[in-house]
Each structure stands twice: as C-alpha cells, then as structure tokens.
Image: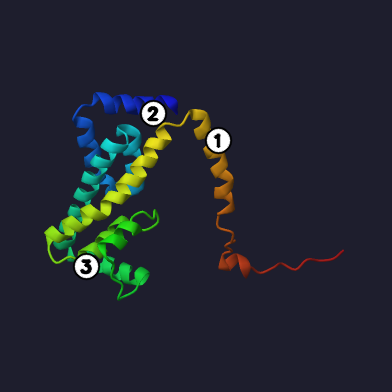
Amino acid sequence: MGDVSSYLLTAAETGGFLAPLLFIGFHLLRPLFFLPVILICITGGILFGAIAGTFYSVIGITLSSMTFYKLVQWMPGMSSKLVQVKQKLMGKSSTFTTSQIAVLRLVPFIHFHLLSLCILEISTSFKEYARSSFYSNIPLAVLYTSFGKWISSLSPVVMFALILTLLPVLYLFRKKQMTIKWTEFFAEKTPTVKQ
C-alpha cells in the first residue's frame, strides 16, 4: 500500500500541469465508470493536498454539472426518467434551495446528478444553473478533499488499525435477512419410510 501511494504522489508531483488536467478530466469521465464523487475528491486530497485538491475538485465537479445540463438538454428522454426517479424518491412537489442542495451533496448515498436535477428545476437559465452548481459543490469538495489529505498523513499501521476497526462495523450493518426461492420453499417432500 505504501508503494502504491508513494508512486501516485510521485506521479502527481512530477506530472506538472498535466496531472491536474488529467484529474479534472477524470471528474468528467467519472459517471461512465460509476464512481462516486466523494471517492474522486478524497483521491484529490491524497494526490494534491487539501487546497490544490479542493480547487481541482471544484473545477472538475462544476464542469461535470455543466456537462449534465447539456446532456439533459440534448436528450430529453433521460430528463423525464430522472424526473420520475426524483419524484419517486423525494416526492412530486419537493423543491430545494441551493443551500439545502449543498448540504445534501455531503450525504454520500444521494446521487450527485439527482441533486443536479434539483438545481436544474430551480434555475431559470444556464448561467444561474452554473452559479448554483458551483456554490453547492464547494462544501463537498472542501470536506472530502480535506478528509483525503488527513488519510494520506496517517501511517500504514494506523490505516491498518482503522480498517480492522471498520470490518466488524461492516459486519454489524450487513443485511440480516434470508432469501428463499419460491421453488425451494414449496418443494415437494418425498415421503420417508420408517423401518
């Protein structure tokens, strides 16, 4: 683990202007790989530090939001499906302010572009959408990039201890139900002969 992190840090330091551009570009490609925004922001903190990583993450996330805006305009079918998902999850008449969306972006389990759709619904123009997206992306980038910087400062022994601590927690929060197939539940039992 130490070798991989030192290799990534060396590549980021010696990459010059190309490393930040690749990182910002990776923010744009993130939806294609189904990676969460939080993971990319944490990686930015590890690679570039808290300040530079936050700056690059805000740029990348905002460009990703603007790309989403253009895709929704270009493919209206995608927009109607997202609106249906939003109505199912958040209700038909729910509207949020930019501040509320900024707080909701901090929650790791809420889809990033679902919240971008909420911003799109309250915006009257692309300029207003871009401004609202920018402001709502700042707390997300600051919090998780700083967390990434904090993780990179830990020693390998402390990281290993944290992982060992998290494993029982993950076990406790597992899904505690058993699924039995219909055919298994109603399977015919063969009669047994007593001898």
Quadrant into which the N terminus falls: top left
Residue on which the image places disc 2: 5
Task: Name which of mark 3 and mark 2 comes first in the sequence.
Answer: 2
Which of disc 2 and disc 1 is earlier in sequence? 2
- Of residue 130 and residue 66, the one placed in the foreground of this image is 130
The spot of residue 23 in percent (x, y) is 25, 38
Query: As drawn, which residue projects farthest toward the bottom?
Result: 93
Q: Quadrant of residue 70?
A: bottom left
Q: Quadrant of the C terminus?
A: bottom right
Q: Residue at x 26, y 43 (%)?
A: 57
Q: Residue 162 vs residue 13: left or right?
A: right
Q: Is residue 28 visible?
A: no
Determine which quarter of the picture holds residue 135. Answer: bottom left
Element under disc 2:
helix
| Crowding near the residue tagged with mark 2, few <14, some 14–19, many ≥20 C-alpha atoms within 10 Å | few
Q: Which residue is mark 3?
A: 121
Q: Which mark is residue 161?
A: 1
Q: Give the amino acid at mark 1.
A: Ala
Q: Residue furthest right?
A: 195
Which residue type does callout 2 highlight?
Answer: Ser
Separation of disc 1 and disc 2 at Cα?
18 Å
Judge from the rendering whether residue 164 lies leftward or rightward of residue 1; answer left or right.
right
Please, is residue 72 above or below residue 152 in the view? below
- Where disc 1 sits, the SS reads helix
